[in-house]
Image: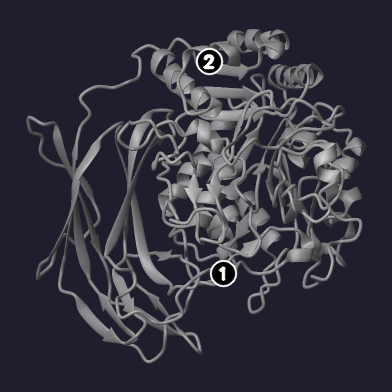
Amino acid sequence: MRITVFFILGLLFSSSLTITGFTDERHLQEKFLSFSFDAPTIVDEGTTLQVLMEGAPACLYQPGQPVLPMITRTIQLPFGSLVSDVIFSSGRVKTLALQKKITTSPFPFSQRTSDELSNVTFSIQTAYSQESYPLRWFTFSTGGGLNQHSEHVTFFTVRVFPIRYSQATDTVLYIDSCNISLIYELPQSSPFPTKVTNDLVIICPIRFITPLQLLTEHKNMVGIRTKIVPLQQIYRNYPGYDKPEQIKYFIKDAVERWGTTYVLLVGGLKSHLIGKPRDNVNTGIRDWHLPIRYTNLLDDDALYDPGFISDLYYADIYDSQGSFCNWNSFDDGIYGGWSHSTSFCFSNNTIDEIDFYPDVYLGRLPCRNLFEVQSIVQKIITYEKKSVDPSWFKRMVVVGGDPYDDAGTNYLEGELIGDKALSYMSGFEQCRLFSSNRYSDPQLTPITQNIIREINQGCGFLLFDGHGGPSWWNTFWPGEFDALIQKGGITVFQFSQLRNTEKLPICVVGGCHINLFNVSFLSTITDLRNKHFMWSYGIPTPECWGWGLVMNRRGGAIATIGNTGLGYEAGGEVGDLDGDGVNEPDCIEALCGYLETQFFKGYQVNTMDILGKNWCYAISEYLHIYPGMEQWMDAKTLEQWVLFGDPSLKIGGYYK
């Protein structure tokens, strides 16, 4: 693959378009992208300048770096297409001297525990480089995954930066137009079958097969062709560096042999009382019914996860060229490696190439015993078979407050993210449990009794955004960051008060370690100072918050999506980061806040009513703006977002 850059005088195409060009005997294809831009607009913000440009609505977002205009475009190519050349040409490059420096992106906030709140710190150079930022006029990324129609495609995303800035001289270079020619080679064949024979594969240990037969029969009855494959069969017949990789190779075979699009993993730790979270840096196997993959991405911060659980590993089967994406591109036995400092683990700071785009819709039921399997199977069947009552299903509850001390903007980030999610859910009754209602309407605040009351009334969707741990979720009153809300939020120990029976929501949660499902009673009660990274600080936690909500006997949720590690949210407001034409606070347009809200956009705006499709849609939309391999924060945001639930679940059931 080559990258070619030309600079030519005169005007190029004056409007944005995409066209398909020639074909030759090597199956080469060409697509053109054309962009035009107005002259830069300089906005004086006091101590710094903001630079805007018509035609480049988005912003390049890298914490600590100048905020510059950007435009992104994503093209879908046939799956397995090979990019052979990307040719960039532009009009005249012009220069503009500035009197002040350009505004920089603030550092994000971590959704960590309350006694450790602070901005994330980064390792960045303090001396201004003589080189222009960014280094090039454009970058591109590719990935292989499922599109909105459940088709395997290769995504080609280009990001164009029509302004480049020298911090050393306070000058900008800018262009008024550019052309990009993408030349790619079509695949000679497709690895996928012409006829689908199996839609859903359930992977589990042998002991769980009997109760899962009921789920299989139900799925087949509603038209989801389903089969159970025991782990022992996979281990006998598939290769791999370790057991998680054997499972991943089996999933690849199921996709190529049967046309499978849904994968349900069933199994967590073997006990609530005791269990070894991990056997090595890559995996937990010995005390697990079904193995887990740990990544080796280390946060560039004083507080960090020493790797974290990622079920996205099992869903990300292919890279953009259709090859197996093993998350171990250096073949060094370190999976998902991304380190920043020699003080951690890896002296050479290797970063594994990861595709990120899901190739199957994947969820997990981290059941620890037969009773849990039987309970969740019955929940899923009842949810899909019963006629849903719009009086409770067409209702959404959002819970949020003021999670971060963002001096200067003073945004109530949790509430803003909740409002953004609600803006997508037209036709739904909206219930806001916000900390800003503290004095105006105390019944609508994130107090525990209010949360329990609203869940018990029933709702189709439930969103929390704030702070969390394996056993709790909470937030702050506006501007009061000394302590979390007293008698606020909700813990796993209070789930026993839930009585919403069969009125079960899909719950999306913003907060750290909400879905950290490697916890057990003994491992958490003995980790008083977090030396073993259980994030419990001595609170006994037999099962994590996210799974505890799903497993609640008298209600709870039908599914939960949340983080297995430290979550991150953007602070401040520096521009229209996602380029949708609406300039909103950055907590909505980047990191966890952006990912969470895309789930609801997928459901209501794009009318996708299958649970796993919305999980996949949110990840894909995120990647179209923020390529996963460019910043570790983006990679982690995607890798740790785990779905506890049936990915083939029909949202609202089959009899609405």
Residue pictured at 60% horizontal, 43% vertical: 641
- Pointers 1 and 2 in contact (C-beta within 8 Å): no
Image spot of residue 464 (x, y percent): 72, 49
Residue 179, label in figure: none
Residue identifier under label 1? 107
Q: Secondary structure at mark 2?
A: helix
| Crowd rating for badge 1 (residues with CA inside 10 Å; few <14, some 14–19, many 20+) | some
Q: Amino acid at mark 2?
A: Ile
Image spot of residue 67 (x, y percent): 43, 72
Looking at the picture, does residue 447 appear above or below residue 382?
below
Discs 1/2, front: 2
Front position in the image: 330 or 417? 330
Q: Amino acid at mark 1?
A: Phe
Residue pictured at 56% horizontal, 69% vertical: 107
In the picture provided, is 245 more to the left or to the right than 518? left
In the picture provided, is 18 more to the left or to the right than 610? left
Q: Secondary structure at mark 1?
A: loop
Which residue extends farthest left?
A: 25
Which residue extends farthest bottom?
A: 99
| Crowd rating for badge 2 (residues with CA inside 10 Å; few <14, some 14–19, many 20+) | some
Question: Is residue 609 visible to the viewer in this orientation of the structure?
Answer: no
Residue identifier under label 2? 234
Image spot of residue 368 (x, y percent): 76, 25
